Amino acid sequence: MYTLGEIAKFIDATVVGDSTINIESIASINIAKNNQLTYIATPKYKQALITSKASAVILNKELLDDCPTNALIVDDVYLSFAKITHYFKKTITHQPGIHPSAKIHNAIIANNCVIGENVIIGNNCKIGANSIIENNVVIGDNTHLHSNVAILHSCSIGNNVVISPGVVIGSEGFGNARDKDGCWHAIVHLGNVIIGDDVTIGANTTIDRGTLEDTQIHNGVRLDNLIQIAHNVIIGENTAIAASTAIAGSAVLGKRCMIGGMVGIIGHLSICDDVIISGKSTVDKHIKKPGIYTGIIPLMPHKQWQNVGIWLVKLDKIVKYLNIKLKKIKD
């Protein structure tokens, strides 16, 4: 916990309001409440600022008149946010074996596992060799972690979940802010990962924790091997994703979607329910209608892509035909 005045010194900010108030944590502007700090980096979220319940907001002076609470005025909001996250980071130290505060109900724990403080493991679970379960993790009933799985602090795993070898859940997200000298400053991700019931996760898949809110994998999701799910992604119920797909931060996938292998999904996009994406496609815009979509660049409805594909394979013949016609004209 820090006072607002202390935080101002950490990021070289000007305080407008009460510098003595205590700040316990950081939250996004839509959900921040009393004793929490938030930030707004763009006027796009001005309405959320006006109605914010946060105790303080990091912003630039152009948005000060719309701020209903205490403010920290800075030149570079995103960079200041990146710097302050480090002061709220939880430090975890691994101790060998099972911490005495862990609550384990009829689980089978293999050799060389590390189970941290206040971990809860439900009935009939199996934890494979060399797995790490950090502090405050909750695991439901009938869940199976294979060997070499890492569940990082404060994440939640539901019932009947199968997690294959090498999976990492709750790793740090990829977020960085650049200063005026071109140097990168990492953003500490303070959210968690919440995984529902009846989920399967393939080998060496990684699921990053959220920046401030949680990354969410809903009930019945099927994830293949070698999938990258970035911070704040939400995957709807019974969606299946094939190997080597990468989903960038804050993308939202609907229910019952099927995503082919090696698909790339751009961040901050939403995909509605019952969408099928063909393998190797790039999703670079919102998808608002159910259906089959295919495309490298650009993404388009599948039927349209089929028509485009017909012309693509004929391009060489079309060029030869045009060259012949052009030669005859010149002659």
Image (tube, helix red, strand yellow):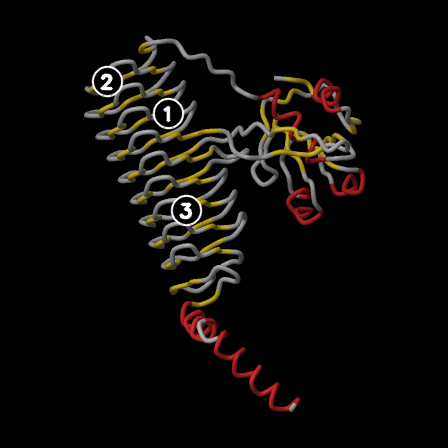
Q: In front here: 188 or 19?
A: 188
Does residue 39 appear left or right of residue 95 in this picture?
A: right
Amino acid type, residue under disc 1 in the picture: Ala
SS state under label 1: strand
Residue on which disc 1 sits? 150
Q: Horizontal and vertical percent for residue 57?
A: 69, 33
Residue on which disc 2 sits? 109
Q: Horizontal and vertical percent for residue 172?
A: 50, 29
Residue on which disc 3 sits? 245
Give the CA separation, mark 3 to mark 2: 31 Å
Q: In front here: 45 or 274?
A: 274
Give the CA separation, mark 1 to mark 3: 20 Å
Q: Residues within 10 Å of mark 1 (few under 14, many from 20)?
A: many
Q: Earlier in the sequence, mark 2 or mark 1?
A: 2
SS state under label 3: loop
Image quadrant for the C terminus?
bottom right
Q: In front here: 169 or 21?
A: 169
Amino acid type, residue under disc 2 in the picture: Ile
The residue sitting at 66% across, 35% down in the picture is: 39
Q: Earlier in the sequence, mark 3 or mark 2?
A: 2
Q: Earlier in the sequence, mark 1 or mark 3?
A: 1
Asked if 245 appears above or below 207 in the picture, the reply is below
Image quadrant for the N terminus?
top right
Asked if 57 appears above or below 87 in the picture, the reply is below
Q: Horizontal and vertical percent for residue 28?
A: 58, 36
Q: Residues within 10 Å of mark 2 (few under 14, many from 20)?
A: some
Do the numbered discs 3 and 2 sit on residues whose CB atoms are within 8 Å?
Answer: no
Q: Horizontal and vertical percent for residue 127?
A: 25, 23
The total of numbered circles placed on residues is 3
Does residue 52 appear left or right of residue 246 in this picture?
A: right
Amino acid type, residue under disc 3 in the picture: Thr
Asked if 24 appears above or below 204 in the picture, the reply is above
